[in-house]
Structure formats: structure tokens, C-alpha cells
Image (cartoon, grey):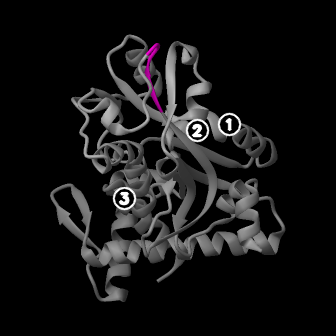
Amino acid sequence: MDLTQLEMFNAIAETGSITAAAKRVHRVPSNLTTRVRQLEASLGVALFIRENQRLRLSPAGHSFLDYSRRILALVDEARTVVSGETPRGTLALGSLESTAAVRIPAILAEFNRRFERIHLTLSTGPSGDMLDGVLDGTLAAAFVDGPVLHPALEGVRVFDEEMVVIAPAGHAPIQRAQDVNGRSIYAFRANCSYRRHFESWFQNDGAMPGKIHEMESYHGMLACVIAGAGLALMPRSMLESMPGSHQVSVWPLADDWRTLATWLIWRRGARTPQLDAFAGLLPEYDALKK
């Protein structure tokens, strides 16, 4: 087993195709086929399930992929440390939409200024999607609603968000969920942690939301609320960043429901120089390293 075999294995696992993987690692397909079969022979297990022109990871392949990524990341880190070079490579980062819009733009700008040799990609979406991305290795780290209690993950609390209910202008006071029992709400998909928090707020007070309209953006939610079509829950910081925020009434939740924490998470034991370079700009993460 050598590093080239691991790089080829990772490429095939992530693309699902010998041809696509060969393009990624700049080799001919037949070379990848041979080297991966040699890797399987040395391990004594089949890493892929072969189906027509596609390859799927076997159960053993899924387990091995995690180790393969960690090995290559450690090798890359070792090269950087001994050479004294500025980190290079790629960093795939995920984020809640509100965090990406309000909390991290200045951090992204400073990162790009300091680390020109690291190519950062940013994906946004609900916490559920971001968690899945970190767990399956497509994201190196992600900002999610936390804390996250998963044995394969670790992280650090970085931001606190005040959650507010927004209603049409002139709406009667909203002190509890019973005040808006049966009202329509606007929210992201079911795997959004903020939506689950909103639904739990209703249920804890013996109330229920009416129709739940699934939206793709906070701007869409705000527009619907301004039009008088229902309610929405969002971070105050996100609301105040949007044009039109003055056209709605704003109601903080009770203390037990008001604050949600945003965490930066990554796979346990899988911190890379690229992740350290980015997250080192967060004071909370820097303290964790010490």
C-alpha cells in the first residue's frame, strides 16, 4: 500500500467512476484499475462493488475511505510543517445561510488575503445537509446549529444567535406559541435545525403551527411575512441585515428558547492545515488549539 494507491482510491470513491478519477489524478484508467486491485489484494478485502460501468464503495471501502483521507491529510500536514511552507490545497467549507451572510464574510475576506494558495469553496444549506457533508467527507468542516453530539465529530462553539419571530407589521404581541396557534409559518426544509426549534416552541406550549411553507431563502420568508401571509423564525442578526426588515414586527422568544449556538464542526481527528488556517481566524478555535 502506497500513497499513490490511496490517492487513486480516494478519487474513485469520490467520483464513482474510473474514467472521472483518472482525469482527476492525471493517469490513464487502466493504471487506476490495476493499482486499486493491487490495493485490494494487499488488504485482503474488496473495497468496491462493481456494477456495470459504476463502482460503489463496499462496507469495507467506506471504513477504509475515512482512514485513507486521514492518512493523506497527515502526510500533507507533515510536508507543510517540515518545509515551512504556507498551507496550500483546497478547503471545502459548509455553512448555515445566515452564518454565511452575516457572521463570516469578513473572515472569508481575511482568509483569502492571508492564504492565497488555499482554494476555499463554500456551500450553504440547512444543518442536516451540512452534517451529512462533514460525515461523508465532502466537507472538511461546517458551521451548524449545535452542539452536535456525534461520536465521529468534534467542534467548537463560535457564535450565539438571538432567535426572533417575525410577523406582519401591526401584529398583536407574541409572548408565547398559544398566541399564534394555527398560524402558517415559513421555514426551510425539515432537516433545518431552526425549523425544528420553531416547531418545538409551538409543541412545548401545547400549540401547533398551521401550514408550513418550505422556502429556499430568508429573503423569501421575509417577503411573505411582509405580505401578511404568516410568520417566520430567524436570527435577529440575519433579519437586520436585510432590506425590508423594518416592515415587520419582531418578537423575541422567551429566555429558554431565545438563544441558539452556532458551532464549527469537523470529523474527529481530521483537522488539516487548511482547516487550521481558516479556523485559526476564530478566537474560540485558536484557544481550543492551545
Q: Which residue range is magenta in the image? A: 165-170
Q: Please name the amino acid that badge 2 sits on.
A: Ala
User: Label 3 crowding class (10 Å Cα cut-off): few <14, some 14-19, many 20+?
Assistant: some
Quarter-wise, where is residue 22 in the image? bottom left
Query: Label 2 to label 3, Cα distance in Å?
Result: 39 Å
User: Label 1 crowding class (10 Å Cα cut-off): few <14, some 14-19, many 20+?
Assistant: few
- Which residue has dot 3 on it? 29
Query: Which numbered disc, 3 or 1, marks the residue closer to the eye?
Result: 1
Secondary structure state at the residue bearing disc 2: helix
- Which residue has dot 2 on it? 100
**Image spot of residue 195 (x, y percent):** 36, 42
Q: Earlier in the sequence, mark 3 or mark 1?
A: 3
Q: Is residue 26 visible?
A: no
Going by the picture, which residue comes out furthest to the right?
84
Does residue 233 sit above or below 160 in this rendering?
above
Residue 267 part of the magenta-drawn span: no
Q: Which mark is residue 105?
A: 1
- Is 208 on the left or on the right of 11, as rendered? left
Q: Please name the amino acid that badge 1 sits on.
A: Pro
